[in-house]
C-alpha cells in the first residue's frame, strides 16, 4: 500500500453501543469492584482489552453461515464441513471438536500424560500448565534466552531453547516425557512467534527420542504471518501454505477457536494417532458430547469453519499484525517500556520499569492497569505479582518474574481511532507515573486470586 494509514479491511455492518461512562462513574465502579478490573461490568468499560479470546467480531459470512447450522445430534452436516476445513488446514486425520481450548488440553493430557511425567513447552499458557499439573506431571518451560529479555528486539522470541529441551529429556528420561508441546504464538511470552526452523529442530529432537510433538496452535495464523514477514524463504508463500507446513511438522495440535478461529466459542484436538484419538473420543463423550459436536452447536461449527478460512486472508493478517504493532510503536516511541518487538495479539507494558518506586508487593502492574481504567476507561489485565505471587497463608508474596499490563486486542472489533485513543490514554497515564501509588490486597482466594481479589489503595 502506498499510504501509511492502516485501513481495516472491512466496514462496519452492525454496531454495538459503548456507554462512555464518565470519570465519576469509573471511580465508583473501581470502588465497587475492589480495584479488581475483573469485577467491572462490561458496560463500565470504554475500550475492553482484557483478552482477545472469544471477543472478536464475526463476519457476515460467519453469521449467515450459522443459519446453515445442522443441529443433528449425530453426523451433523456442519461437523463434516468443520472436519474438512480443519483436515485441509492441519493435515491430521483425527479431528475432535471441543467447547474451547482447555477442554482439548484436558482430554489430550488425560490420554497421554501420567503422574511423574514432564511436558516441555516454550511457555505453557496457564490452562495448559494447570491441565498438565492436574495429571500430577511437571509443566516445564524452555523458551529461548531472547524470549526472557522483554526489551530485546529479536524476530522469533517464542523459539524453544533446543539445548534445554534436549537436556531436560535426557535428565528426566524419555519414558517420562510423553510429548513435547510448542505454543504458536507464545502467548505467555508476549505473543512472540516461533520460526519454522525452530519447529523443525524441535521435531528432529522429538524424532531422535521417539517423542510425539504437538502444537498449542491457538494463534497459528498470526505465527504464520510472522514467518512470512521475517523468515528467509517464506515471503512468497501464502499464510495457508505456511500454516500447513507448521502443522505438518507436528503430530497433532490443541486449538482454542476463540482466537484465530475468529469465533466466540469453540476449539479442537486434531492428531494422527488413532489409538490416542479413540481414547480421546471416549473421554469427549463423557465430558463434552458426541464426537460430531463435542460441546458445540452445529452453528458454532459453521462459524469456526468459516473463521479458519477467513483468518488466513493476507489483507486481514496484514491489518491485524500492523495494528497491534502500531499501538506498540506509539507507546514505545513515547519512551514507555514495553515487551519488544510487538507480539501478535497484545501490547505488554513493563510496569516494573515504568513505576520503579512501587515494589512488587505493592503491585505496580495492578496500579497501572487501574489507572488506565480510571483515566480513560481502558481495561487491560495485570500479569504480575497479583496473578503469580500468591504465597502460603501468612507469608509475604513472592515477586513475579515480570510486572506487565497486557492490552490484548480483540479481532476486527476496534477501529484505528479506538487504538489512537488507547495510545493517548497510556501516554497520559505514564506521564503521571511518579504520582502513582501501590495497592494492598484485603481479600483473596487460595488459588487464582487475581480473578476475585479485592484491593485497597495505599496512602
Ligand atoms: C496459548 C493458549 N493456549 C490455550 C488457551 C486456552 O483456550 P481457551 O480459553 O479456549 O480454553 C489460550 C487462551 O487464551 C491460549 O492463549
Image: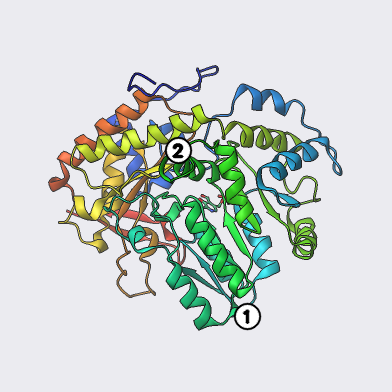
Residue 125 visible here: no
Query: Would you place residue 363 above or below residue 329 in this image?
Result: below
- Tell me, yes or no, whether the two marked residues, 2 and 1, touch with CB atoms within 8 Å: no
Q: Nearer the viewer, residue 132 or 289?
A: 132
Ligand 1 lies under 8 Å from the Cβ of mark 2: no
Q: Badge 1: how crowded within 10 Å, few (<14), some, or many (20+)?
A: few
The residue at 54%/69% (across/down) is 205
Q: Is residue 72 above or below residue 406?
A: above
Q: Please indicate, yes or no, whether residue 266 appears anywhere in the rendered image.
A: yes
Q: Where 43 falls versus 75 (above or below)?
A: above
The percent coordinates of residue 79 (x first, y second) are 78, 40
Q: Residue 195 in the image: state x and y as whole percent.
A: 46, 52
Q: Secondary structure at mark 2?
A: loop
**How far apart are the alpha carbons under marks 2 and 1?**
48 Å
Q: Residue at x 43, y 37 (%)?
A: 409
At 57% from the left and 63% from the top, the residue drawn is: 203
Q: Which residue is mark 2?
A: 41
Name which residue lies at 43% across and 25% down.
18
Mark 1: is the Cβ under 8 angstroms from ligand 1?
Answer: no
Query: Is residue 150 rendered to the left or right of residue 450?
Result: left
Q: Eyeballing the image, is 60 above or below 187?
A: above
User: In this figure, what is the number of numbered marks?
Assistant: 2
Q: Decide which of tag 2 and tag 1 comes sooner along the chain.
A: 2
Looking at the rendered structure, the secondary structure element under dot 1 is helix
Quarter location, residue 58? top right
Q: Where's residue 335, x and y in %?
A: 18, 42
Q: Quadrant of residue 358?
A: bottom left
Q: Residue tagged by mark 1?
A: 175
139 and 357: which one is in front? 139
Amino acid at each position: 500500500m502506498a499510504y501509511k494509514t492502516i485501513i481495516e479491511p472491512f466496514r462496519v455492518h452492525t454496531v454495538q453501543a459503548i456507554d462512555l461512562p464518565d470519570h465519576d462513574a469509573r471511580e465508583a465502579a473501581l470502588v465497587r469492584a475492589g480495584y479488581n478490573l475483573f469485577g467491572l461490568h462490561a458496560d463500565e468499560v470504554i475500550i475492553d482489552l482484557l483478552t482477545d479470546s472469544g471477543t472478536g467480531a464475526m463476519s457476515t459470512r460467519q453469521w449467515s453461515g450459522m443459519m446453515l447450522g445442522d443441529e443433528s445430534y449425530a453426523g451433523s452436516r456442519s461437523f463434516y464441513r468443520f472436519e474438512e476445513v480443519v483436515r485441509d488446514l492441519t493435515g491430521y486425520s483425527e479431528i475432535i471438536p471441543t467447547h474451547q481450548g482447555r477442554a482439548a488440553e484436558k482430554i489430550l493430557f488425560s490420554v497421554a500424560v501420567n503422574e511423574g511425567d514432564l511436558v516441555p513447552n516454550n511457555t505453557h499458557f496457564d490452562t495448559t500448565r494447570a491441565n498438565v499439573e492436574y495429571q500430577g506431571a511437571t509443566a516445564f518451560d524452555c523458551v529461548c534466552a531472547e524470549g526472557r529479555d522483554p526489551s530485546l528486539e529479536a524476530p522469533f522470541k517464542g523459539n524453544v531453547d533446543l539445548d534445554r529441551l534436549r537436556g531436560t529429556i535426557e535428565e528426566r528420561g524419555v519414558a517420562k516425557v510423553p510429548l513435547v508441546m510448542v505454543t504458536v504464538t507464545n502467548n505467555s511470552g508476549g505473543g512472540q512467534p516461533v520460526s519454522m526452523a525452530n519447529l523443525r529442530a524441535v521435531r528432529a529432537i522429538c524424532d531422535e527420542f521417539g517423542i510425539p510433538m504437538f502444537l498449542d496452535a491457538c494463534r497459528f495464523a498470526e505465527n504464520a504471518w510472522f514467518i512470512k514477514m521475517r523468515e528467509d524463504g517464506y515471503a512468497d508463500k501464502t499464510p495457508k501454505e505456511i500454516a500447513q507446513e507448521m502443522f505438518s511438522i507436528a503430530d497433532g495440535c490443541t486449538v482454542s477457536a476463540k482466537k484465530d478461529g475468529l469465533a466466540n466459542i469453540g476449539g479442537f484436538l486434531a492428531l494422527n494417532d488413532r489409538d490416542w484419538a479413540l481414547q480421546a473420543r471416549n473421554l469427549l463423550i463423557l465430558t463434552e458430547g458426541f464426537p460430531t459436536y463435542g460441546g458445540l452447536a452445529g452453528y458454532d461449527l459453521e462459524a469456526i469453519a468459516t473463521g479458519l478460512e477467513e483468518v488466513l486472508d493476507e489483507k486481514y493478517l496484514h491489518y491485524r499484525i500492523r495494528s497491534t504493532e502500531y499501538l506498540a510503536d506509539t507507546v514505545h516511541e513515547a519512551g514507555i517500556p514495553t515487551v519488544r518487538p510487538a507480539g501478535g495479539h497484545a501490547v505488554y507494558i513493563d510496569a516494573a520499569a515504568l513505576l520503579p518506586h512501587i515494589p512488587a508487593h505493592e503491585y505496580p502492574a495492578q496500579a497501572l492497569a487501574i489507572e488506565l481504567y480510571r483515566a480513560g476507561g481502558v481495561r487491560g489485565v495485570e500479569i504480575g505479582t497479583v496473578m503469580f505471587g500468591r504465597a502460603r497463608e501468612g507469608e509475604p508474596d513472592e515477586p513475579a518474574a515480570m510486572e506487565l499490563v497486557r492490552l490484548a486486542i480483540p479481532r476486527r472489533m476496534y477501529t484505528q481511532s479506538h487504538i489512537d485513543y488507547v495510545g493517548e490514554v497510556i501516554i497520559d497515564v505514564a506521564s503521571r507515573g511518579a504520582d502513582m501509588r501501590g495497592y494492598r490486597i484485603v481479600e483473596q482466594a487460595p488459588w487464582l486470586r487475581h480473578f476475585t481479589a479485592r484491593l485497597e489503595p495505599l496512602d
